[in-house]
């Protein structure tokens, strides 16, 4: 008799899969590929269209089955939030987020277990950046997880420490890191050149990711690039050009940066993202907040020099493989300016950071992540 791990894969067919959809796809694929002998993986998905079911089955051909709940995603979200349904039954359930059937159970008697994942604490630290309904839902689901989850997975020790300030999970917290998204490989030179032309990439540029929300640090980076003496190097922002009524070009001009040197790109395709990252002089992660720091991991995987702020997560993930810039309101833009200038103007520093970046990339793989998830459920 085989042992089945039941994975909540619903996010891959959500209207906007986002980073959680990427994580769900990567982890589920790795769990299937690295299943121990006598074990298999089943998917759990909300009531959807036949087309969506086919997409899931095509995305994960190694699934042993696909459990289809009786409720659609919206209704299922509300039901699981209130604990009103036992669907989709028991067994070993792993959720890539907080969207999970959290209910009272005793795994020592039934063998049932539910593990959820938390990627950030934005609903608690920056609720104003999210919709009120999402904040309410996330806080409610974490409370349910505190009562009913057998374990909660977080990507870094830094997030584990911050989680302890929000909710006490005791020894149920497990730190299991992430890895670069599947397909993040620079294409052959001709294809890479065609993609770079289509994306409008200059010959030399910096890359950052996020929105103009203050905690993302992009405003600080633009202020840094506008400082006297900083090289006039273009900036490619992976993300939207606007945040509310604020536009990237306007912020650039107000910071003393020629708006023509700043452009936003959307990179839904992994190959496009690989082209953008691998062609950069450096990737800059100026954020003020602790998240999963997947952007650093993906830059490392392509051997790109990385400049990052000294948030606890960035320091943990980078492990001295990037150029760290002390965070803080006083003089932060000036310190970013100095870091950017040194990497752009000193080829020896850029080369050294490229080497340390490639070395650090070896610490992250989906195989390792999957094996640790399997081991977690075995330990439970």
Image (tube, helix red, strand yellow):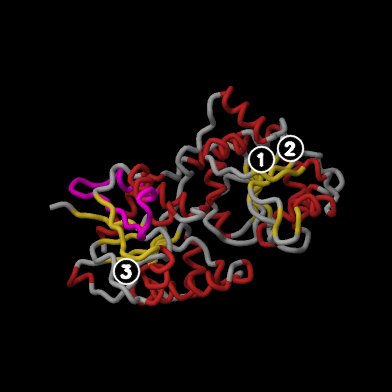
Q: Does residue 145 appear anywhere in the picture? A: no
User: Can residue 185 be seen in this snapshot?
Assistant: yes
Q: Residue drawn at (75%, 59%), measured in percent from left and top?
A: 246
- Position of residue 205 in the picture relative to residue 366 (left or right): right
For residue 282, which numbered disc appears in the image? Answer: 1
Q: Which residue is mark 3?
A: 150
Out of 85 and 118, give the one closest to the viewer. 85
Please tell me in which quadrant of the rendered image residue 267 appears. top right
| Quadrant position of the C terminus in the picture | bottom left
The reply to whether the C-beta atoms of the residues labelled 3 and 1 are less than 8 Å apart is: no
Distance in Å between CA atoms under marks 1 and 2: 8 Å
Query: Which residue, as the protein is rendered here, is positioned at the far top?
Result: 190
Q: Residue at x 67, y 30 (%)?
A: 197
Q: Earlier in the sequence, mark 1 or mark 2?
A: 1
Q: Which residues are magenta?
A: 27-52
Q: CA distance from mark 2 to mark 3?
A: 48 Å
Q: Secondary structure at mark 2?
A: helix
Classify 281 as above or below 377: above
**Mark 1 element type:** strand
State the residue lying farthest toward the left: 1
Q: Which residue is the site of mark 2? A: 344
Q: What is the quadrant of residue 290 in the picture?
A: bottom right
Name the mark nearer the viewer: 2 or 3.
3
In the rendered image, residue 198, in percent from the top left (x then y), is placed at 65, 32
- Disc on the earlier residue, 3 or 1: 3
First-in-chain label (2 vs 3): 3
- Assign a secondary structure to mark 3: loop
Marks 1 and 2 in Cβ contact (< 8 Å): yes
Q: Position of residue 318 (x, y in %)?
A: 55, 49
User: Within the magenta stretch, is there residue 32?
Assistant: yes
């Amino acid at each position: 008799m085989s042992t089945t791990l039941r994975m909540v894969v619903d996010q891959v067919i959500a209207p906007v899969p986002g980073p959680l959809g990427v994580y769900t796809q990567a982890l589920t694929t790795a769990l299937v590929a690295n299943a121990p002998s006598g074990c298999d993986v089943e998917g759990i998905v909300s009531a959807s269209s036949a087309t969506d079911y086919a997409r899931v089955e095509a995305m994960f051909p190694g699934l042993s089955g696909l459990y289809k709940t009786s409720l659609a995603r919206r209704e299922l979200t509300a039901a699981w939030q209130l604990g009103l349904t036992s669907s989709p039954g028991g067994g070993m359930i792993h959720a890539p987020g907080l969207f999970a059937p959290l209910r009272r159970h005793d795994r020592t008697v039934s063998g049932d277990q539910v593990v959820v994942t938390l990627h950030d604490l934005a609903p608690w630290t920056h609720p104003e950046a999210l919709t009120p309904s999402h904040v309410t839902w996330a806080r409610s689901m974490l409370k349910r997880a505190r009562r009913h989850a057998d374990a909660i997975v977080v990507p870094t020790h830094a997030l584990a420490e911050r989680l302890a300030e929000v909710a006490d999970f005791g020894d149920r917290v497990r730190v299991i890191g992430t890895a670069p998204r599947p397909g993040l490989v620079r294409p052959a030179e001709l294809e890479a050149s065609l993609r770079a032309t289509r994306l409008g990439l200059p010959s030399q540029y910096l890359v950052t990711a996020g929105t103009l929300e203050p905690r993302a640090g992009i405003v600080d980076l633009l202020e840094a690039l506008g400082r006297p003496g900083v090289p006039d190097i273009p900036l490619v922002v992976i993300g939207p050009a606007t945040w509310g009524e604020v536009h990237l070009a306007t912020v650039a001009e107000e910071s003393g940066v020629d708006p023509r040197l700043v452009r936003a790109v959307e990179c839904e395709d992994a190959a496009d993202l690989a082209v953008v990252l691998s062609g950069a002089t450096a990737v800059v992660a100026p954020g003020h907040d602790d998240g999963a720091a997947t952007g650093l991991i993906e830059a490392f995987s392509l051997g790109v020099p990385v400049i990052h702020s000294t948030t606890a997560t960035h320091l943990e993930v980078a492990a001295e493989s990037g150029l760290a810039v002390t965070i803080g309101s006083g003089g932060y833009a000036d310190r970013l300016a100095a870091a950017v200038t040194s990497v752009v103007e000193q080829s020896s520093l850029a080369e050294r950071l490229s080497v340390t970046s490639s070395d650090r990339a070896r610490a992250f793989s989906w195989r390792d992540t999957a094996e640790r998830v399997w081991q977690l459920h075995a330990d439970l």
